[in-house]
Image: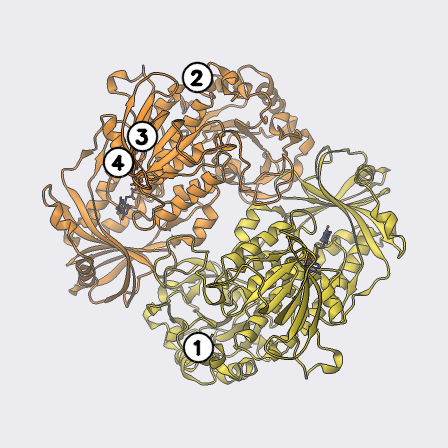
Chain colours: A orange, B yellow
Amino acid sequence: MQFHHNGYVSGDPTIQRPAGVGVDRRDELPDEMDVLVVGTGPAGMITAAQLSQFSGVSTRIIDRRDGRLEIGQADGIQARSVETFQAFGFADRIIAEAYRITEMAFWKPDPTNPSHIVRTARAADDETGVSEFPHLLVNQARVLDYFAEVMAHSPTRMQPDYGWDFLDLEVTEQGEYPVRVTLQRTAGPDEGTTRVVRAKYVVGGDGARSKVRAAIGCSLDGDQANHAWGVMDVLANTDFPDIRTKCAIQSTSGSILLIPREGGHLFRMYVDLGEVEAGHEKEVRATSISQIIANANAILNPFRLDVKDVAWHSVYEVGHRLTSRFDDVLPEDAGTRNPRVFIAGDACHTHSAKAGQGMNVSMQDGFNLGWKLGHVLEGRSPAALLRTYSAERQVIAKNLIDFDREWSSLMAAKPEDLADPTELEDFYVRTAEFPAGFMTEYAPSMVVAEAHHQALAAGYPIGKRFKSARVRRVCDGNDLHLGHLAAADGRWRIYAFAPAGGNADPRLAAFSEWMLTSAGSPLADTPDGADANSWFDVKVIYQQLHTEVVIGEVPEVFRPRVGIFGLIDLENAFGIDPGNDIFDARAIDRDGVVIVVRPDQYVAAVVPLAATHELESFFAPLRSPQGAAATSR
Amino acid sequence: MQFHHNGYVSGDPTIQRPAGVGVDRRDELPDEMDVLVVGTGPAGMITAAQLSQFSGVSTRIIDRRDGRLEIGQADGIQARSVETFQAFGFADRIIAEAYRITEMAFWKPDPTNPSHIVRTARAADDETGVSEFPHLLVNQARVLDYFAEVMAHSPTRMQPDYGWDFLDLEVTEQGEYPVRVTLQRTAGPDEGTTRVVRAKYVVGGDGARSKVRAAIGCSLDGDQANHAWGVMDVLANTDFPDIRTKCAIQSTSGSILLIPREGGHLFRMYVDLGEVEAGHEKEVRATSISQIIANANAILNPFRLDVKDVAWHSVYEVGHRLTSRFDDVLPEDAGTRNPRVFIAGDACHTHSAKAGQGMNVSMQDGFNLGWKLGHVLEGRSPAALLRTYSAERQVIAKNLIDFDREWSSLMAAKPEDLADPTELEDFYVRTAEFPAGFMTEYAPSMVVAEAHHQALAAGYPIGKRFKSARVRRVCDGNDLHLGHLAAADGRWRIYAFAPAGGNADPRLAAFSEWMLTSAGSPLADTPDGADANSWFDVKVIYQQLHTEVVIGEVPEVFRPRVGIFGLIDLENAFGIDPGNDIFDARAIDRDGVVIVVRPDQYVAAVVPLAATHELESFFAPLRSPQGAAATSR
Ligand SMILES: Cc1cc2nc3c(=O)[nH]c(=O)nc-3n(C[C@H](O)[C@H](O)[C@H](O)COP(=O)(O)OP(=O)(O)OC[C@H]3O[C@@H](n4cnc5c(N)ncnc54)[C@H](O)[C@@H]3O)c2cc1C
Ligand SMILES: Cc1cc2nc3c(=O)[nH]c(=O)nc-3n(C[C@H](O)[C@H](O)[C@H](O)COP(=O)(O)OP(=O)(O)OC[C@H]3O[C@@H](n4cnc5c(N)ncnc54)[C@H](O)[C@@H]3O)c2cc1C
């Protein structure tokens, strides 16, 4: 964490100084804004939290609810989400309060007495060590609280505007704020009154019944029937031995997905209520909590569940459905028009809760979109950048729905219907990278280069997220995770992996020189007066131990001047961790290489150190035609 | 973290529900209170933060300042303090914001050109891995902020009362609130007015010039002369290569202790100004910041320091001084009278800043005292318990002053005066356990048993702090640090290390039975209606893997009922970490053993599993004669 560079910060350094639109932010919803986010669910909140880091961008986030979510909804947090929380600064805190999944147990009918269940297997949750981050369970409400805190502590001092129902929108393509949005007050003395506001962009994170989606003429297509579960968050005593372990329980009376929860006592059960044909929703929705508990007891036989308190329950009913596009650009306009309206999260994709994906994929939608909006609105990049959002995320949603369909049908299958009795456990272990959130691999586009030089850094597949590794910082010998320094601050990252000769090799100095002086350098547009590293975070990793690198010889691009005093930032040069050399761990060419990483942590390009022209070509389309001029607001 | 057991907690679970005196706590300072803490420095704040966990105890903490400390004073945080912060719930956050010391560099005059300094050595900060916690540097103000948050989020909703100057006190020995305290308002409209309040106990954490100390007739004795340093917290550019590394710099122009600080830019320099004879303080105190900077530049030659901003500076002047007692019991009354007034921190001991001890030892004073006051005031233990505070902490202070005297004179020595050129580095490495805070070893007393059975658990020396080790929780397979579950909640810990046979060995069940049913059991006094584990935290560690222990067979004392629903707490049984068997790591007898740990994390007793009579004898003097009756408030 870096601070004090503009003078001493006496209080909590995670509370950033107000800047830009945050200096005199009004509490009331204004008539005009850069971005209007509809919905304070995971998709909307992460989008807003990311945008809150752009001090030049005015964003408002509304919800029809009159305050924060209090309970219920999703609770599964995959490792990729925790990695994302780390970038937003709250991973440690949410880990401390959440339940941590370390293994999963599988229960089936006892072959010798099928009316009783028995444990047939246990599987480690992350057998292959896919991430240094854990897999958690915690209420969705708490995730939203943390994002709200990120916004509140951001330079823009953003806060959700509760009590506004989105009714409709129209893209006028006129004026500075071309999207005309109609809202209705759902709370307060003026409840029921409508109001029109205007925005440059609108993001619909308004859930499965999204009105933003409807307004742009999209629909969720897929299964005809919904699958229903009775879901309950309860406090209970029981003799079921795995009550604090995640379990898939299959019995002759139906199946349960058991989810232990934060705090050591609460747990969730999803009790399968089967497929719901259209027209029969009413009966299923009428399932009472006592029926759900009775079903659970029948399934758990011979164990007993003595429920003491029901914190929340619901009949959660959802199908496998997907929209064909995530923005308002009609297929016939693709390539000619830039989007003005986006949808994210459940507004675009719905699927079962069984693989614990809903909140996670929704957040990655928003993380993908947020920085792109910020860059376009601050004039760092042209509006065409926004086309990549729908293109990238629609594919991911499709993969998700395919995966979830397979997992759900395996979980719903009767034991006797499975080809192999261990099919379920095997699938769980084999596919671990998917539900952990690390299978995402974006295709080449204006933000993902072609993989011509992938061989120079086999451990950083282009299009996949930059996997952290340990390094030692030169200036202070601190043993750090390189990737954990990449905060969700909207900056591109450029990691120069130095050639074997380190500072003695002229290629490193040449790279620095080009970066600092060439008109083709991505740094060339950084506005005058801004910190040298405010748009790009440029770091160097040497093949030597940190003690073998002389800080005074580190080329200048890695020692940018920051803050009102022009202090030299010494924290961008690293040596290897002798116990785990990052060059070996990530198969990096010892002649050096440059890795470009997007603000949402995906590897965008791998280029040889000397191929600055390739760096130039990669960034050229991302540079705003107006250049730095456009950004001086 | 455990919560939800009294029903669903929707918000931040680290904010405890108000209880006891916190339910209707008044903002204004009342006329009567159980404990009055004077001074919001590290000693006072930790005492109050610990007391804030006792919902039956009314505590107020005052300071003559009109608000929080903003800048300056101490910044060194030893591993033992971070371990303590972990117990108070804020270690992760302070680690994230602090500077982390991983190594120390030593600079000396260049033998070939003595007017220039050269680096002669680097030493790892914690060569021997004395702790899993880091050594940090962060401003004292932030430590105080975190303790203030702990209090504010505690059941008692405590907040410091700023703007009150302690003038004097008198122990009347009369009535329920025998200490009569005179205060003066230092802020607000009533500034200057005096007021008398009454307390059962008073804690003087009012620093080196303590008036509480004076009021109980104590004085600081020791060195005649003070040692002075120019201290500055600055932002600067420099070509000195180790500016982000802790350094001891000795030059022909004097010496510097360089302390890099939080945030990546700020650093502190202590520039030696030498001994100050009585009568010459004035000249030294007049040392200007420009003189300090000039001195620093002379010492750093050939490197240059270009100071851009001075955040804080001071001439810090202090001698090695110590009081002979830490409470108001005169030597002639020792053993017959119980104390009413205590002093802690700099009020009792002052010494150089060079070993970075002041804030740390002061906090351990308060951690030692806080729970004892809580236990006496809640009627868990007799007032004689309070005698152990002065007895235990005075010895520690004496050791500290001896250590610091040696370290200071080594640092002040001219290189040519040292017997061996590496004497300084060698001392630093050799004595690492001391400044890390782990050399404390309390002597036998009513809270530390004799070491008759030490051989049964050689890795838990009686009187030293309980060193954590990894275990796996039976109910959920979570890989945890056993010691990190010991929150600063005022509870005693009883760890039963199971015999090799585990639950099949009748000794474990017999221990449980005795604990639950014997009148001699320490649990016998737990008030009716309180959670079974509210006074004692009782855990069991098996020699098996967690998967080999059947949770339903874990004896009952390890599965207490908690909360309004009488939920069974399953989180107290552990198996070994297969990679690091705690029985081997701590040399624990495989026949089983019971380890008793104090609320301040010191090992109090080691007894064989079957020796329940020894457990009974150990706790007998600690049990209040009134028993549980006294506590029903
Ligand atoms: C009742 C319910 C129960 C669920 N249970 C589970 C579960 O058990 N397990 C699981 O994994 N997932 C569950 N989910 C799904 C999971 O919560 C979602 O996958 C996840 O929250 C997706 O995030 P999102 O931001 O896209 O949408 P949501 O979290 O649904 O957020 C949408 C937000 O938009 C607001 N909104 C909607 N329409 C408007 C409007 N017109 N104007 C203004 N605001 C609007 C809503 O109030 C809401 O705050 C449940 C969802 C719901 C609604
Ligand atoms: C100006 C200064 C500079 C220091 N610089 C360093 C340094 O550079 N390095 C280092 O390691 N240590 C330094 N120290 C020492 C270090 O801060 C202490 O060792 C540490 O704070 C001890 O904690 P404490 O709680 O015992 O006392 P303190 O932190 O001194 O706290 C005492 C508190 O009591 C209050 N108080 C005093 N008298 C009264 C009264 N009559 N009524 C009400 N309140 C009162 C004070 O306002 C203060 O808040 C410095 C101390 C001071 C005062």
- Chain under numbered label 3: A
Res A195 label: 3
* Nearest-to-viewer mark from 3 and 2: 3
Q: Is residue A266 left or right of residue A118?
A: right
Q: Mark 3 belongs to which amino acid?
A: Arg
The kind of secondary structure element at disc 3 is: strand
Q: CA distance from mark 1 to mark 3?
A: 59 Å
Q: Is residue A589 left or right of residue A223?
A: right
For label 4, the crowd category at 10 Å Cα-Cα, with few meaning under 14, some 14 to 19 and many 20 or more, is many
- Chain under numbered label 1: B
- Could you tell me residue A559's position as x and y percent? 63, 29
Q: Is residue B17 visible in this depiction of the protein?
A: yes
Q: Mark 1 belongs to which amino acid?
A: Pro
Question: Does any atom of ligand 1 lie closer than 8 Å to the CB of label 4?
Answer: no
Q: Quadrant of ligand 2?
A: bottom right
Q: Nearer the viewer, residue A26 or A229?
A: A26
Q: Which residue is mark 2?
A: A621
* Nearest-to-viewer mark from 3 and 4: 3
For label 1, the crowd category at 10 Å Cα-Cα, with few meaning under 14, some 14 to 19 and many 20 or more, is some
For label 3, the crowd category at 10 Å Cα-Cα, with few meaning under 14, some 14 to 19 and many 20 or more, is some
The kind of secondary structure element at disc 4 is: strand
- Could you tell me residue B555's position as x and y percent? 37, 75
Q: Mark 2 belongs to which amino acid?
A: Pro
Q: Examine the image and state in which quarter residue A440 appears.
A: top left
Res A349 label: 4
Q: Which residue is mark 1?
A: B527
Q: CA distance from mark 1 to mark 2?
A: 72 Å
Asked if marks 1 and 4 fall on the same chain, the answer is: no
Q: Is residue B364 left or right of residue A467?
A: right
Q: Nearer the viewer, residue A542 or A98?
A: A98
Q: CA distance from mark 4 to mark 2?
A: 30 Å
